[in-house]
Image (tube, rainbow, N blue to C red):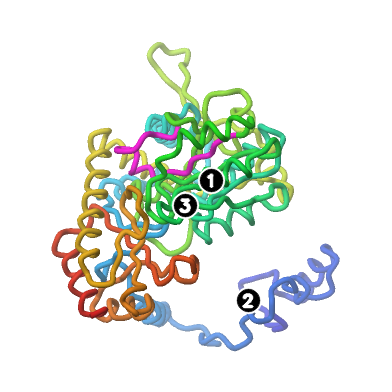
Amino acid sequence: MTNEFVHRFIPNSSPGVREAMLKEIGLENVEQIYEEIPERLRFTGELDIPSWPVAESEVARRIKAAMNKNSTAGEFLSFLGAGCWPHYVPALCTEIIGRSEFLTAYAGSDAADFGRYQAMFEFQSMIGALLDMDLVSAPVYDGATAAGDAMHMASRATGRRQVLIPKTCSPDRLATIRNYCDPWLEIEQVDYDRQTGQINLGDLKDRVSVETAAVYIENPTYLGFIETQCEEIATIVHSKDALLIASVNPLSLGLLAPPGEYGADIACGEGQPLGMHMSFGGATLGILACKDAERFLGIMPSFLTAISTTSVSGEYAFSYHTLPDRMVYSTREKARSYTGTSSWLWGISAAVYLALLGPKGIRTIGEHNMQKAYYAMELLSGIKGVRAPAFAAPHFNEFVVNFDATDTRVSEINQGLFDQGILGGKNLSGEFPDLGQSALYCVTETHDQDGIHRLVEALKNIVD
């Protein structure tokens, strides 16, 4: 941080420019900028990079060597999900979003960007039909920020600050929501039934009040089970004039009732299953939608793409609309919402995916996910000491497996699987200590019978 190195290609690194910039923001040295970062998180060594210019071929060799240290889910038989799932991505999705008119279209105008706007209009239309919602935002950064946006919308619509969230929510997602909503909203958690995993309706009734802006539920949940009490939850929430926010896995909606059907006012979700490859970091696809009501339309934080006729008979035009005073572009650090650039590209990929599958295809994919998950649960439950699933509720494509009776820790099990080329379920023992030695397993349409059998045999050998 204190290095006075001047880079020949970075003008801001020269002493004169650096001092002028520090003076402008009222600081004496660069170190003050990083004071809020704890010392334990700072890198204090020397980067292992050449101190002299090297050939491009040498740079490529070094980067390739570094990347080869990693192993990807594609090289293993993977049963990891927990927010980023191994679904098949049709080749056409990758092909279309790689076209220059989409890939390079950072922004545009109503007069020049017809293709991009039309593709986004199609995305919003298909997502609206899938969710049974009327208004669909352009994609936001990811499912967690979409949940945060939904909560801000509920607060603005009701004038209240409290939001209730089930304790089965992913700790990572909860951390993002808290960060996104602080200091405007107060996040409190609702207990769950230890047998089914579903929301404890008694605790929910005790907590919902005239101070509650919204109750947030997940269906399917982070732990894989389906919340079957949605209509009862909606009745409890609406009895206090609060709003119901439902976060969904869009692929599950080929089988499950859409959120608009069971009383949700606002819907959100992670759209990575819709034609996106698994990745580590970066934007994914946050889905945000609501009912067609004036109090929601005026507070939706992102872009809406609209269609209209032109002066030419039979011709249509597409454009986007937003209220910029709510966005980071206008209000900067005071903004309560943010949308990322790359999410538009993933929205186009999702539109291609949904158009390829159609309603029947979405149902078929959902059936494959659920059937294969139940097949895996049945075989896993036949292993001595293994309980699968851990919750007595319907499941979609993920489920909790408990290993307490095997006297083997999940970390040991996952290492044993890794040594055999298998990525086991996500270790939940740290996130949910009350579940004991449990892991979250994911089974999708990409898993075949041989792969599931291979997992079962490997687990038998490890825990016996």
**Mark 2 or 1: the one toward you:** 1
- In the picture, the disc for residue 331 is none
Q: Amino acid at mark 2?
A: Arg
- Asked whether, in this view, residue 422 is left or right of residue 212, the answer is left
What is the distance, in whole Å, between disc 3 and disc 1 at their CAs? 26 Å
Task: Please say whether residue 464 is visible from this viewpoint.
Answer: yes
- Magenta stretch, residue numbers: 243-259
Q: Would you say residue 245 sits in the magenta stretch?
A: yes
- Classify residue 38 by image quadrant: bottom right
| Residue at the spot of label 2 | 8
Q: Would you say residue 395 sits in the magenta stretch?
A: no
Q: Is residue 249 above or below residue 414?
A: above
- Asked whether, in this view, residue 457 is left or right of residue 183, the answer is left
> Which badge, 2 or 3, comes first in the chain's sequence?
2
Q: Is residue 319 above or below residue 374?
A: above
| Residue at the spot of label 1 | 146
- Classify residue 52 by image quadrant: bottom right
| Residue at the spot of label 3 | 193
Q: Position of residue 177 (x, y in %)?
A: 59, 53
Q: Position of residue 146 (x, y in %)?
A: 53, 45
Q: Position of residue 431 (x, y in %)?
A: 50, 67
What is the distance, in whole Å, between disc 2 and disc 1 at their CAs? 41 Å
Helix, strand or loop at label 1? It is helix
